[in-house]
């Protein structure tokens, strides 16, 4: 898994402070910003984080480039609807040798790993065969009409791979660019850093949180699963490790 912040709102913490203060000020943002110091911004932000005034958080966003993750993960990721996504297309990108993610439980068991890898190889073979069959069939008429064979095959390839891709598994590796505002990120971290979240998206969320803390430490210092800033919200489904989880995210 590879995760990297590729852009974010300039001066994220001061942007949120200025936005929030404007709601209670007779003067404009320019005057608010002129009087703002790093210390005063941090103090106000800590106070703001204890309120339910959340709209200022939406003025700051972070964009992440994410690679080496499965389609299982991105199917979950895109359920966070107040965000923007750009994902590698299996319709336009021909995957002659697709990469895949092996879950840890399967990786640790030699018998299970062999079955898994054999299944991945069969999927690749089926995809290659389907592409070849469909391209040959679709290009035949164009060739008969006088088009160069190479050009004819290239012209129908996208139409063919968009159907052949149906054989690819959820394990198929993908790449995606994601943009979320701070309010969405805070909710994302609450539900996806939790031990009850699926292992791969939990790993992603934890790494994203680690990176945004480097950019805006005050803004994200209390972020993480629900048990980090209060009692576990999972009720009877709790993992029972709240103290351990709190320590983990305090030292992230």
Image (spheres, grey):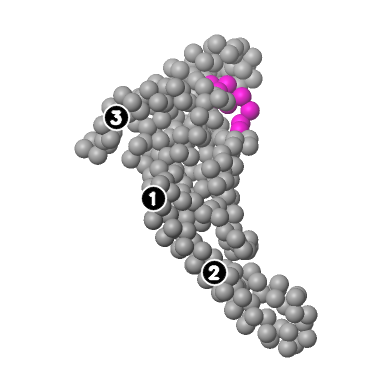
Report which residue position mark 3 lands on: 241
Q: Secondary structure at mark 1?
A: loop
Q: Which element type, helix, strand or loop, lies under badge 3?
A: loop
Q: Earlier in the sequence, mark 3 or mark 2?
A: 2
Relative to the observer, which residue lies in front, 151 or 115?
Answer: 115
Q: Residue at x 45, y 63 (%)?
A: 119
Task: Mark 1: give few (<14), some (14-19) or many (20+) Cα within 10 Å.
Answer: few
- Mark 3–mark 2 distance (CA, rounded to whole Å): 44 Å
Q: Which residue is mark 1?
A: 109
Residue shown at 44% from the left, 17% from the top: 47
Residue lying at the far bottom of the rendered structure? 144
Indicate left or right for 65 with 107 as reference.
Answer: right
Judge from the rendering whether residue 58 lies leftward or rightward of residue 28; answer left or right: left
- Spatial CA distance of label 1 from label 2 is 24 Å
Label of residue 125 in the image: 2
**Residue at screen point 59% across, 42% down:** 65
Compare residues 87 and 137 and report the one nearer the observer: 137
Task: Residue 248 in the image: state x and y as whole percent.
Answer: 40, 26
Predominant SS along the magenta part:
helix
Q: Quadrant of residue 125?
A: bottom right
In the image, what residue occupies the spot 61% across and 33% down?
8
In magenta, the rendered stretch is: 8-17
């Amino acid at each position: 898994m590879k995760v990297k912040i590729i852009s974010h709102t300039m001066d994220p913490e001061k942007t949120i402070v200025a936005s929030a203060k404007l709601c209670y000020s007779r003067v404009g943002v320019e005057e608010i910003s002129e009087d703002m110091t790093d210390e005063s911004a941090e103090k106000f932000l800590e106070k703001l984080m204890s309120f339910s005034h959340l709209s200022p958080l939406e003025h700051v966003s972070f964009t992440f480039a994410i690679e080496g993750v499965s389609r299982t993960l991105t199917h979950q990721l895109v359920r966070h609807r107040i965000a923007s996504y750009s994902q590698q297309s299996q319709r336009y990108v021909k995957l002659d040798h697709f990469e895949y993610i092996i879950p840890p439980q399967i990786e640790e068991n030699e018998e299970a790993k062999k079955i898994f890898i054999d299944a991945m190889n069969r999927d690749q073979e089926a995809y290659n065969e389907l592409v070849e069959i469909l391209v040959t069939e679709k290009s035949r008429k164009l060739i008969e009409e006088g088009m160069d064979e190479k050009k004819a095959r290239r012209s129908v390839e996208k139409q063919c791979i968009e159907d052949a891709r149906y054989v690819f598994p959820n394990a198929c590796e993908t790449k995606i660019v994601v943009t979320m505002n701070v309010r969405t990120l805070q909710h994302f971290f609450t539900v996806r850093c939790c031990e009850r979240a699926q292992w791969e998206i939990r790993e992603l969320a934890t790494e994203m949180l680690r990176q945004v803390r480097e950019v805006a430490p005050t803004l994200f210092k209390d972020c993480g699963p629900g048990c980090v800033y209060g009692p576990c919200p999972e009720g009877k489904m709790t993992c029972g490790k709240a103290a351990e989880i709190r320590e983990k995210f305090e030292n992230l």
